Image (cartoon, helix red, strand yellow):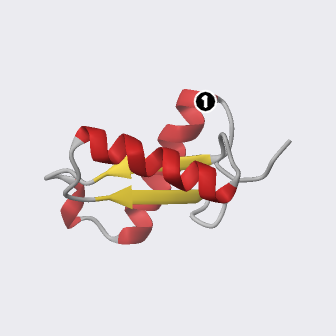
Amino acid sequence: MGITDGKVVVMHGLTRDEAIAAMRAVKAALGATDGIAFATSTETNLGWKLGDLVEHVLEEHEAMTGKKATGERP
C-alpha cells in the first residue's frame, strides 16, 4: 500500500474524549462511516516523517479492518 491510497487524520494534544468527538465529527462531515484511518501522536511517531506515519497508519487500518482506507462509499 502506498501513501496515496487512503485518508488519514492525525491528532495531537487531544484528550481521549476530544479525539473520539473529533473522529465522529470528521466522519459526519465527510459522510463516511469507514474508510478513514485515524491516529494520535505518540512520543515515538512525533519524530517520524509524515509520509512514514501515514503509510504506517494506513497499513494498521487495513490490518485491523481488512479494508483499505479510501474514504469511498460501497
Q: Relative to 70, does residue 63 appear above or below in the rendering? A: above
* Front residue of 58 and 25: 25
Q: Is residue 56 left or right of residue 46?
A: right
Q: Position of residue 21 (x, y in %)?
A: 40, 45
Q: Position of residue 56 (x, y in %)?
A: 44, 51
Q: Relative to 12, does residue 20 appear above or below in the rendering? A: above
**Residue at screen point 38% across, 41% down:** 20
The residue that label 1 is drawn on is: 65
**Residue at screen point 27% across, 65% down:** 48
Q: Is mark 1 on a helix, strand or loop?
A: helix
Amino acid residing under circle 1: Thr
User: Can I make out residue 27 in this image?
Assistant: yes
**Residue at screen point 19% across, 65% down:** 47
* Front residue of 47 and 42: 42
* Front residue of 11 and 2: 11
User: In what quadrant of the picture does the C terminus appear?
Assistant: top right
User: Can I make out residue 6 in this image?
Assistant: no
